Image (cartoon, rainbow, N blue to C red):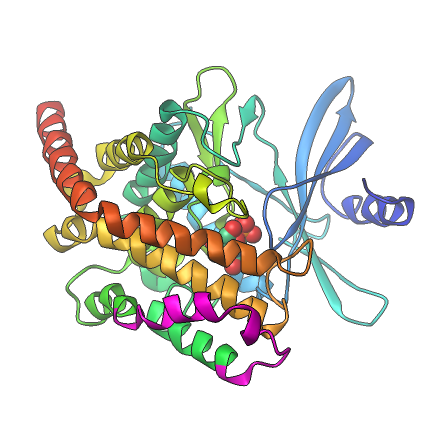
Amino acid sequence: MVIIKDYMELKRIIKEFDITGKLIEISPINNGIINTTYLVVFDDEGKKRKFVLQKINTNVFKKPYQLMKNIENVTSYMRNVESENDSNLSVIETKDGASLYMMMDDFSQKEYYRVYNYIDDSVTYNQSVNTDVVYSTGKAFGHFQKVLRNYPVELLSETIENFHNTKKRFQDFLRSYKENVVDRNKTAFEEIAKILSRKDDCNLIVDMLDDGTIPVRVTHNDTKVNNVLMNKETKEPMAVIDLDTVMPGSGLYDYGDGVRSACSTALEDEKDLSEVSIDMDMFKAYTDGYLSEMAPYLVPEEVDNMANAIKIITLELSMRFLGDYLDGDIYFKTNYETHNLDRARNQLKLVEDIESKLPLMESYIKESYQNALGKAKVKK
Ligand code: GN1
Ligand code: MG
């Protein structure tokens, strides 16, 4: 529930944007652990028009105007490349023609708000419900990578420096562990040890990017299952959302993160670890969906490391959750004291599960890649 004071404030903020009609509703949407999001409904001469209002978390995104520039660049490029039937996000400007509305909070800190169009007849899932949804998710993120494959990456700024630099993430984790600022190490020894023993795994993708073995692509960097809007009826993908972290990066992280998120049998903060694993049918569906779009454009080293990428991004997120727990929960939103620790345990359980399934995953990826290449040739 939005409390009344907030509602009045939000009402005042939304009026700053270039939207016609009468405001009829503002309600919170729970779709992430960084930004704060609301659904806004207007009545425009009898027609309901919906929008998404978001407050940008500037603790995480330090340069909101650069971030908006990236989003505008990428969405307008995609609109030109894609057919008119494709739904895409559009940024609604303020009445002054800006991409963001900036205001001061009660402590004289700057707050930034933005508005997108709401894509009608769409649905998102926080957890995958079946292999059709997972296939659609893989296809949507593969499509995103495909459409942007020729976009000049140098035009995009890094909205969060070293976001998926797993080597650097490991160093940050070591710092959190050594500093032990809120004295929580003692409650997480087992988890800390699991991460420390996997130090070498952190280098693989970063080293291949650095020495040019794999290409730098335009990547989404947050390919969670709830970042794809699906058609309510057909479950076909409609649009990829949450473009804050679109940056230059490795396509491997996007593929890996997609499987991590869409193919887990449990939510990210499920505490019963016996419930947490990768569902192999879901993994196959995601891989098929992704490769149905991207197979013809991947270099061999990318294909060879897709299974490793699933493990590496899951390990990276474990380090981020556990590091934040050790730092005293300063980055991710939490609902209770050990929320980040539970998330880290959950992701570490996934890492172990992925390790046990790596050979199976590798052989399926090869098979799916050959199938997808075959189909792509037939089409040409
Ligand atoms: C954060 O806020 P949300 O849910 O879109 C995080 C991702 C993590 C994810 C885990 C900018 O994304 O990197 O994978 O949580 N985004 C940022 O749930 O840090
Ligand atoms: Mg996100």
Side of 85 relative to 281 (left or right)? right
Residue 128, horizontal then vertical, whole percent: 45, 31
* Residue in the image at 23% along x and 54% along y: 308
Q: Is residue 376 above or below residue 197?
A: above
* Residue in the image at 34% along x and 64% along y: 154
Query: Which quadrant, please, contains the C terminus?
Result: top left
Residue 35 within the magenta-colored segment of the rendering: no
Residue 288, horizontal then vertical, whole percent: 24, 32
Residue 81, horizontal then vertical, whole percent: 34, 37
Query: Which quadrant, please, contains the N terminus?
Result: top right
**Number of numbered discs:** 0
* Residue in the image at 61% along x and 56% along y: 339
Q: Is residue 79 above or below residue 198?
A: above
* Residue in the image at 80% along x and 32% along y: 25
Along the line of sight, which residue is nearer the eye, 230 or 52?
230
Residue 292, horizontal then vertical, whole percent: 23, 32
Q: Answer whether residue 68 is visible to the viewer in this image.
A: no
Side of 201 relative to 230 (left or right)? left
Tell me where the magenta segment starts and ends, as one range: 178-200
Along the line of sight, which residue is nearer the eye, 272 or 144?
272
Q: Answer whether residue 141 is visible to the viewer in this image.
A: yes
Side of 294 relative to 44 (left or right)? left
Q: Is residue 83 above or below residue 6?
A: above
Name the quadrant containing residue 2.
Answer: top right
Along the line of sight, which residue is nearer the eye, 244 or 202?
202
Q: Residue furthest bottom?
A: 179
Name the quadrant containing residue 130.
Answer: top left
Residue 194 within the magenta-colored segment of the rendering: yes
The dominant secondary structure in magenta is helix
Along the line of sight, which residue is nearer the eye, 69 or 292?
292
